[in-house]
Amino acid sequence: MQNGKRILVAPLNWGLGHATRCIPIIHALLDYGHQPYIASDGVALQLLQKEFPDLPSFELSSYKITYAEKGKNFKWKMIWDSPKVLKAMNKEKKEVKALVKSLNLDGIISDNRLGVYSKKVPCVFITHQLNVLSGNTTWFSSKMHQKIIKKFKACWVPDVDGKPNLTGKLGHLKKSKLNIHYLGPLSRFTKHNLPQKNDLMVLLSGPEPQRTLLEEKLLEELKYYNGQVLFVKGKIQKKQKRRTLQYQNATVEVVNFMQSKELENALNESTLVLCRSGYTTVMDLAKLEKKAFFIPTPGQYEQVYLAKRFQKNGVVPFANQDDFKIKDLELCNEFSGLTQYDTTIDYATLFEAFSKVKENSEPTSTSLST
């Protein structure tokens, strides 16, 4: 495109994953001469403001998503919270309408924010969940999600089309009328061959209270570890804070958060990563070709599915949060670890979505990675 477009990028504030996978897209928009605007709430907005301090940013109404303390109550907590989510969606629709007008926007990229949509400009939806797993209500939740996606001009799926792939049934439909574009895995990181400083890196994220519950459990378990540990809590705060815990056989450096470049180096310098099985984390670890151990968020069907799938395929082992013991990390010796997909994202073609809308265009499923 010859003329730069004014594009709103709005990730869901559900942990840090939706925000972090928007980072390479924002960089690409800038590289192609476009003007990105950032919109989100909570830690997702804070993270992007730290990464792009010179870009205009706006706060949207919060969905106020929290997890149940017990995994078995996850779905019912989501159902219970759905009225306030719908209320927030209606508010953000009005907020986006105002932004489209005041900023004279040319397009919108929504990463799983269901209310970030406008009929006035081309809108793209990013998701790896074409199927939304929810136990015995999976068919219904998937159809509802697909109905919302259908409103958008295109759906960008950060995975490869075909096999092998990272998402499995989450990101692949047998039949679809959606305008799906497979980007290839999205990651803000680059693999570097650096000296290994950490035997283990713990990387936390996700909504409360489960993030804190896992933090407390792992700090207790690490008393029985033998080696050098870097523990990144995933708590976005004004200032970075560090402290060192010295156990009998383990030295644990605890840091509240890291920005992209520092985190990239830390991951490259770590032999093993202990983390959630959130999909953005999976993409990052695949890009860096890391060995890992997963502890899925209790009750979150997507993370449990991914963890089970990678263990079944001999890639990464996992344990349920309540059952995890530090000795379980020894299982990683029997697994291959994640490997990188050799993909190049064709951003020039992707960004054509924000050119003039073509009349009577038929939806297709395409892959934009080579």
Image: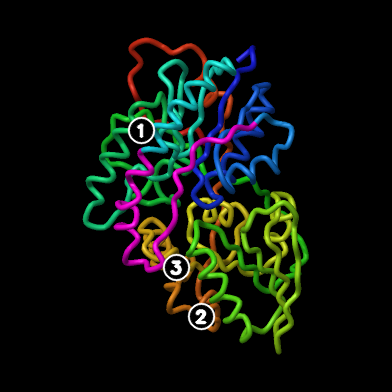
Residue occupying image coordinates x 48% and y 52%: 279
* Amino acid type assigned to the residue bearing label 3 in the image: Gly
- Give whichever of 192, 109 is nearer the camera: 109
Measured as percent of width and height from the top left, residue 175 is found at 26, 37
Mark nearest the camera among 1 and 3 is 1
Number of other residues with Cα within 10 Å of mark 2, as a class: few under 14, some 14 to 19, many 20 or more = few
Measured as percent of width and height from the top left, residue 21 is found at 56, 44
- Give whichever of 220, 285 is nearer the camera: 220
Side of 136 where 357 appears, left or right: right
Q: Earlier in the sequence, mark 2 or mark 1?
A: 1
Q: Which residue is mark 1?
A: 149
Number of other residues with Cα within 10 Å of mark 3, as a class: few under 14, some 14 to 19, many 20 or more = some
Q: Which residue is mark 3?
A: 314
Picture quadrant of residue 83: top left
Q: Which residue is mark 2?
A: 328
Extent of the magenta region: 57-86
Asked if labels 3 and 2 touch by Cβ distance under 8 angstroms, the answer is no
Q: SS class of the residue under badge 3?
A: loop
CA–CA distance in space, label 2 to label 1: 40 Å
Side of 61 where 68 appears, left or right: left
* Amino acid type assigned to the residue bearing label 1 in the image: Ile
* Amino acid type assigned to the residue bearing label 2 in the image: Asp
Q: SS class of the residue under badge 2?
A: helix
CA–CA distance in space, label 1 to label 3: 33 Å
Q: Earlier in the sequence, mark 1 or mark 3?
A: 1
